[in-house]
Structure formats: C-alpha cells, structure tokens
Image: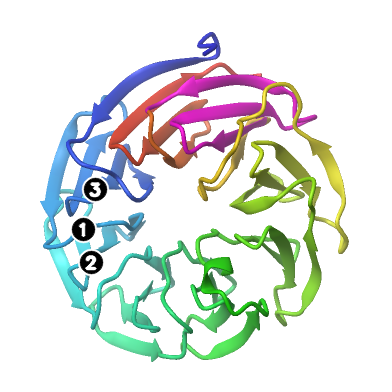
Amino acid sequence: DNHAFAKEVWAVQEDGDMGGGMALTQNQLIYTTTQGEVKAVNAETGLQQWSYKTNGKVYSTPTVCDDIVWVSSTDKNLYGLQLENGKPKFSLSHERSIVASPVCDQNLVIVLGTDGKATAWNSINGQHVWEFDSINNFTVTRPQIKDGIVFFGSWGNEFYALDTATGNLKWKWNNGHTNRMLSPAQVVPVITHNKIFLASPDRYMTVLDEETGEVIWRYNDPENKVRESIGVSEDGNTVYAKTMDGVILAIDATINERKINWTSSGEDMGYELTPTPVVEKNGVVYAPTDKGLIYAYSAADGSFLWKYRIATGLINMILPTDSNELYVSSMDGMLMKLQVTPL
C-alpha cells in the first residue's frame, strides 16, 4: 500500500462489529456497534466521550439534529440521545426491529421499519406525527431528503417518495422484478439536477425524475456492472458508480441521457460488492471496498492516486472534511481518522 498520501491520526478498534456509518458534529464523532452501543469520541483525539447501550443490535447510521443524536435499534426503539452526554431524551417504540437509519426534516424525525411502515415523530417533544404503512417488504437504507420529500427504496422492488410533513405518498416506482434480491433497497440514493440516481443488484443504473418518479433512463451495461455503490461530486454535476469489477464510472448528471465522462484508470479494486457510497472531496474520489481498503482517484480524470488499508472488513463509510481529513469505519470494528495530502 502506498502511504505517502495518507497518514493515520488515530484509530479505535471496537470489540464488536460496526454495521453503520458515523455522524460528525461539533468536534464529536458519533458511531454505533452491533453490540447495541452508541458512542461519541473526540474527533481530534479519538478519545471516548460517552457511550449508551441499547437493548438490541444497532445497524443504523446515527444522525444529529438540534443537539439530539437519533439512532435506531433492533430492540424496536428509536433513541434520541443528548449530544453532550449521551443520556436518553427520547425512546420511541416501534412494532418491530429497526435497522434503517433515521433522518430529520424541520422538526420531524423519520424512521423506516422492518414492518412495511415509515413513521415520523416530532423531534422536539417526541409526539407521533404520521405513519405510512404501505411499504412493500422491509427497509435498511439511509433515506435522503430534499425539499420536504423523503426518498428511499425497499426490499420489495420499489422506490418511494413521501411528503415529510404528512407522510402522503407522492409517487413510487417499481423495477418490474419479482425477485426481491434485485431491489433498490441498499443503495443510498443520489439526488441532483432534479434527478434520482439508483444502482441495484440487478446491475442497472436507474435515473428517475425527482418530481414524478418517471424513468429518465435505465441501463444495464454488461461491460460495467454497477451495484449499489454510488455517490455524487461536490458540485452535483457528476454521479460516481463503482462497478463489480472495481472500476469507477463518472457519469454526467446534468443531462437526461447516459454519458460516461471517464472510467477510472490505473489500479482497480478487483471484484467488489460493498454497497457503501463513493464520496468526492477536494478533487479526490474516495471509493470503499469490501476488503478493508479505501481507494483514491482523481476527480478530474479518474486516474488512480493511492490506496490505504483501514482493516480487513467491509468499509461502512468514508466521511471527508474540508480540512483534508477522512473518518473511516469498517464492519470489523475499526474506526480511523486519516490526514490526507491534498492534490
């Protein structure tokens, strides 16, 4: 591995696995473990500041809204913890286990269940606001919110747009498959230029109209098989997709047809299945792998820059900052901060 471009600042090795990503706020890094813990460390030093244990396993990525850390657990609860000390302010019960990640919009916190329901609570007082009970099969994703609409896919071959204020269905799209394993369920949707970009285990990239859910284009490229791991450039003009052969495609997001601006060159990642999003920061595209490595490519032309080993397990999240820092977590319980050399 070429380490001339990246340097470890600190690392935390958890006893158990980590199944979700992280949230960075006010010099605190919040993360979760499959042992049911929610933890906060000092982002500068990696030293633990607080820990809270739920009664189930946690696979969700925490989100912070108004100094409350929201995290869902398989113990059927959505927890709202105080950012300062991790003490619970809310414990909102659900009918079944929750593995999807909560999201906030205005004064609402929304969570998707394993019971075909999406539920919203008031994030100030914890009161139940609405429920949408027509999701086909269960949900595991990190939903995305834009302009008062929450977007997410399910393991029922469907993708949904709900009004965050009311829970009313704006539209839904069905991919036409009967096998649920081909669903757009694991992908974190990319929303840019009034379009929603998805990649699924059926090897299709699908682009939907943000307003109507109509298909703008949908393509299965036998030479470049995409699968769930996508991301967007900082300027919103490029969508990145990681192929199953470990190559990055840079796709023009500004037009309503499929156009590849570049395909990554130099070292590829090999056979790849991790659904974790690709991210771009300061001219570098960072790609996760299922082998504990992160890869860096030039955002200008896709040329390989460097790779760095975090662990041996699947990379859950790559979280870059404006200060050329990366926070990275892996499924085998490694949390690491890197300082990277700018281009």
Question: What element does badge 3 sit on?
Answer: loop
Circle 3 sits on which residue? 33
Which mark identifies residue 38? none
Main structural element of the magenta stretch: helix, strand or loop? strand
Question: What element does badge 2 sit on?
Answer: loop
The quarter of the image holding the C terminus is top right
Q: Is residue 255 above or below residue 165?
A: above
Boundaries of the magenta span: 284-311
In-image side of 285 versus 79 (left or right):
right
Give me the C-alpha separation between circle 1 and circle 2. 5 Å
Q: Position of residue 76 (x, y in %)?
A: 21, 73
Circle 2 sits on which residue? 74
Q: Residue at x 31, y 21 (%)?
A: 10
Q: Residue at x 31, y 79 (%)?
A: 122
Mark 3 crowdedness (10 Å alpha carbons): few <14, some 14-19, many ≥20:
many
Q: Position of residue 301 (x, y in %)?
A: 80, 29
Please name whichever residue, 336 or 48, is drawn nearer the observer in this view of the structure. 336
Say whether residue 291 is magenta. yes
Q: What is the three-letter code of the residue carrying label 3?
A: Thr
Mark 1 crowdedness (10 Å alpha carbons): few <14, some 14-19, many ≥20:
many
Please name whichever residue, 291 or 33, is drawn nearer the observer in this view of the structure. 291
Q: Residue at x 50, y 61 (%)?
A: 186
Q: Earlier in the sequence, mark 1 or mark 2?
A: 1
Q: Are marks 1 and 2 in contact (CB under 8 Å)?
A: yes
In-image side of 204 versus 340 (left or right):
right
Whether residue 184 appears in this view of the structure is no
Q: Position of residue 54 (x, y in %)?
A: 13, 60
- Residue 206, by quadrant, is bottom right
Circle 1 sits on which residue? 57
